[in-house]
Each structure stands twice: as structure tokens, then as C-alpha cells.
Amino acid sequence: MKLANRVQALTPSTTLAITSKAKALKAEGHDVIGLGAGEPDFNTPKYILDAAIQAMDEGKTKYTPAGGLVELKEAIVNKFKRDNGLDYNQNQIIVTTGAKHALYTLFQVLLNKGDEVIVPIPYWVSYPEQVKLSEGEPIFVKAKEEYNFKLTPEQLEEAITPNTKAVILNSPSNPTGVLYNKNELQALGEVAVKHNLWIVSDEIYEKLIYGDEQHVSVASVSSEIKDRTIIINGVSKSHSMTGWRIGYAAGNEEVIKAMSNLVSHATSNPTSISQYAAIAAYNHSEEEIHHMKKAFEERLNKLYNWIVEIPNITCVKPDGAFYLFPNVKEVVKASPFNTTDEWVAQLLEEEKVAIVPGSGFGSDDNVRLSYATSLEQLEEAAKRIKRFVEKYS
């Protein structure tokens, strides 16, 4: 049997492979510490659960408009105004089955065969695969570690060709956790506007920022940049609602309409109950979000210190999200293992610590550690990693 070329070209998810192996070892009775998770370890806040129960009790269990409930779109419009200083109308919003679905649908309506999308390295694993599924071509540009993994305007300018259609920005970033400031976003945005590119701005981690840093949406920098920007966001990370699958896109009305037409034939609509839960998420105070954010910040500061104390490991300290992306090049070089992937696999085998190799994010010298677990587990994981490094140094 011959499968479609589009799926044969896909690269399997590294994160899912590591998670699967860790679960298998755990099922065998091993004491596995999983640092591969891409989701908060907190339950969805109770007021959101209550809103979902109420919606079910009231019979709100039927089809909704393909692009999302009017009430949820209005809540998202208000969120943009309140949090980002951005004005959108409901025709510029589409609600989707998770932010990943928003990205997938966007690339499907934007790209024709051979269109190029600039993807900064390190990247979230699904960006290049979704571009390829849309018959586009991901153009990788390595954001250097010495520049905190941030794409520069010069790099963007150099990568642009007549076939370039869009550039992806992710701030705060998965996997690095780094955050672009307003000046950096303006410089990149001006290059995109100059070359008539779409800016795909993934802002899913905007609520998880630590210290004195502030999130800035690239669309808020200028009206010209806003006109070229499609924002991708959702409630998965901000409100610990990963399983509810509610994301959205905001931007150019013609693009959003095309996305709505496409999803009407693909998913019909996002789950009705999840949409009512998301309305509650955005129409409620953010007190419980701040509680989760405070816990993540404490974990970040402690885990970062534990990791950088390990000889030959360096790490850019993140501004947000819930990942560390340390450089283990020297550690791997001193070991008997040929690649970071082999080093990570042996770490899981010997010390039962599951982390994700950077190869899945386009960066072979790094690994991703999620701190979406308890401080006790993080401290124990750091001890095991240190022991493993010292054994093979």
C-alpha cells in the first residue's frame, strides 16, 4: 500500500517518542521522572469546570458556528483589547480545535505549492511539518544561542526570496522560553512589511512570563505590522486547559473567512462545552493564573540554578513558558555517545529521567527540560542528570 506523499514526508514527533518510552518504563514499575511534558501540571481552575458543567446542564451540547460561538469571539475581542491594546472585530476571529489546529488551518489557506515560510531555529516541532503538509517549504534560519536564540532583522532579510510568503515568530518561545521585546519585534516587523510577508505570531505562552519582563504582541507595534500579522493563541497553557482543545486566530478578515470555510468541512466546530468553558476563562479574574505563574517562576529559578551548576552545561535563562533549553554539547563530546539523541536515550535508560533531545527542535546541541512538575521531582531529576554527566565525563 502506498500512502500519500504528504504524510510520508513528515518527521515523527521526538517529544511523543520520548513520552511513549517513559510511559512504558513507568508501566514496568520504574521510578521515571518525566520532563518532556508540554502542558501545565495544574488542573483546570474550578470556575471553568463549573461553567462547563452548567453548559451541559443547560443543554448547550449542540453544533455551534464553524468559526466559534459569538459569545466566545466577543470574549476574545475583549481579551485583545484588555491585554494587548489591540482592536479586532468578530469577523477577524476564528475559534479552532486548539492553537495547533489554528496554525494548521492558517497554513492551509495561505500557502501554495513552493511557497516558503521562514522558520527560526530552534522551532516548535510542528511548525515545519505543518508547512510541509500545506505543500510549502520551511526555510530554516538558525537563531544563535549567543543572541539568546532570537532571530535578527539581518537574518530575516537575508533569508527572504521571491517565494517567501511568511515568517513564524513565537514569543515566549517553545523550546527556549525566550521573549522578544518591543524594539526587536518592530525591527522584524518592518522587514516583513517591506517584503509584504505574513507574520505568523504564536503567542500561546503570553501569560507565562517571569520577572520584570512584559509580553508584547508584534501586532501592537504598528498598524502596518498588525495588517500583516495573524496571531495564534488559546487557553491551553494560560488556563491549564490543554485537553479542552480551544485555540484561535486573529487577523486579516479575508484570511479568517477562508479559515472558517475550511474548518466547516474539516471539523464542523470546536467542542461546544469547551467553548463555554473558554468564555468563563476569559471573563473571570486571573487570580488562579497568577498562582500557577508564581509556582512556575519558583521552579524555573531553582531548576535553572541546579542545571547550570552541572559541569560543562550552559543555559540561556528563559523569560517565559515552562522549559529550559540547556546546551549539552561539551557533555556529549566528553561521553562515549555519538549524538545528543543517544545521550538522552541512555539518560532515560540508566537514570530514568525523560528529557527531549534538541534535534526535534532543529538544535542538536541542546535538550529541552519541562519544569511542569513538582519541585521535589525537579530536584531529584537534576541530581540524576548530574550523576549521569559525572559518570561519563
Image: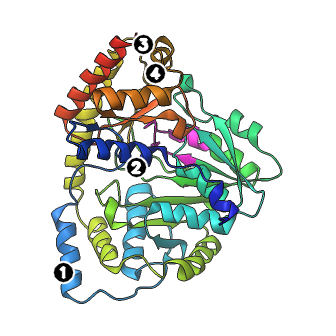
- Give the labeled residue for mark 1: 54
Give the label, 2 or 4, closer to the camera: 4
- Which of the two labelled residues, at mark 3 and mark 1, occupies the earlier sequence position? 1
Give the residue type at disc 4. Val
Point 60% across, 65% down: residue: 106
Q: Camera-side residue: 383 or 260?
A: 383
Contact, mark 3 vs mark 4 (Cβ under 8 Å): yes
Q: Camera-side residue: 229 or 87?
A: 229
Question: Which structural element holds mark 3?
Answer: loop
Left or right of residue 75, residue 11 in this image: right
- Give the labeled residue for mark 2: 206
The image position of residue 363, as x and y in percent, is 55, 32
The range drawn in magenta is 169-186
- Give the labeled residue for mark 4: 328
The Cα–Cα distance between marks 1 and 4, rounded to whole angstroms, is: 49 Å
Please check the rendered image and state whether residue 184 is part of the magenta-colored stretch, yes or no: yes
Residue 275 seen: yes
- Give the labeled residue for mark 3: 312
- Which of the two labelled residues, at mark 2 and mark 3, occupies the earlier sequence position? 2
Q: Camera-side residue: 173 or 30?
A: 30
In the rendered view, how is the structure colored? rainbow
